[in-house]
Image (tube, helix red, strand yellow):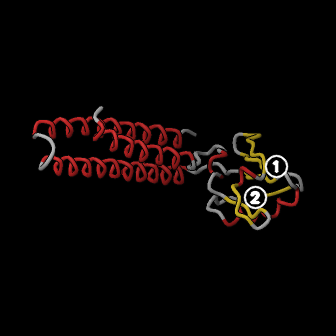
Amino acid sequence: MKEQVKVYDEKMKKAVDFLASDYQAIRAGRANPHILDKITVDYYGQPTPLQQVGNITVPEARILQIAPWEKSLIKNIEKALLASDVGITPSNDGQVVRLVFPELTEERRKDLVKDVKKKGEDAKVAVRNIRRDGNDAFKKLAKTEISEDEIKGLEDELQKITDKYIKDISDMIDAKSKEIMTV
């Protein structure tokens, strides 16, 4: 692959990777430790990722359990969970903090699927914008460095890469939507 196209390929890959990490945070009726990835806990005055202050396990399909390394952190963990957008009230027994996920209603599942599709469309727009930027850059090269035929080749190459990533995103949307709608 030509160097000029490789830069845009990497940018598109980052857009798809971002979407994948976004999708991991969407819960589909099952407890998924990744929904806690963005939560930070006050640990001796420092905001620290939740994964670094305790052990997160999934003892049952709809329960997340957080066992802090230090028992004194239980209140801070609960406070961080309440302040987050997880939307579930934590409970503790003095040893561990538990998050019990309610069964998703049909309506909530449909809302989640809409959200998944919107995020997927946003990622597709990002990929297409990267393609446009690449094509603009190639046209600027035409004035100085390379021929029209070479420009056409670069644009075709970039279009193939764009099509591949758009298909990947569509597949991700379908897979996540199916996962959410599975009861």
Q: At 66% from the left edge and 52% from the top edge, which residue is drawn?
A: 36
**Badge 2, how many Cα within 10 Å: few under 14, some, many 20+?**
some
Q: Amino acid at mark 2?
A: Pro
| Residue 6, quarter of picture | top left
Residue 81 in view (yes/no)? no
Q: Residue furthest front?
A: 145
Q: Is residue 18 left or right of residue 148?
A: right
Residue assigned mark 2: 90
Q: Amino acid at mark 1?
A: Ala
Q: Quadrant of the C terminus?
A: top right
Q: At 44% from the left edge and 39% from the top edge, which residue is drawn?
A: 172
Count how many numbered circles sit on residues in the image.
Answer: 2
Mark 1 element type = strand
Give the x, y percent position of residue 179.
53, 39
Q: CA distance from mark 1 to mark 2?
A: 13 Å
Give the x, y percent position of residue 146.
14, 41
Q: Which disc, if any, is residue 24? A: none
Q: Quadrant of the N terminus?
A: top left
Instruction: Point out the tag, 1 or 2, that comes first from the N-terminus.
Output: 1
Q: Nearer the viewer, mark 1 or mark 2?
A: 1
Q: Which disc, if any, is residue 67? A: 1
Q: At 33% from the left edge and 35% from the top edge, which residue is drawn?
A: 164
Q: At 20% from the left edge and 46% from the top edge, which residue is drawn?
A: 138
Give the x, y percent position of residue 115.
46, 53
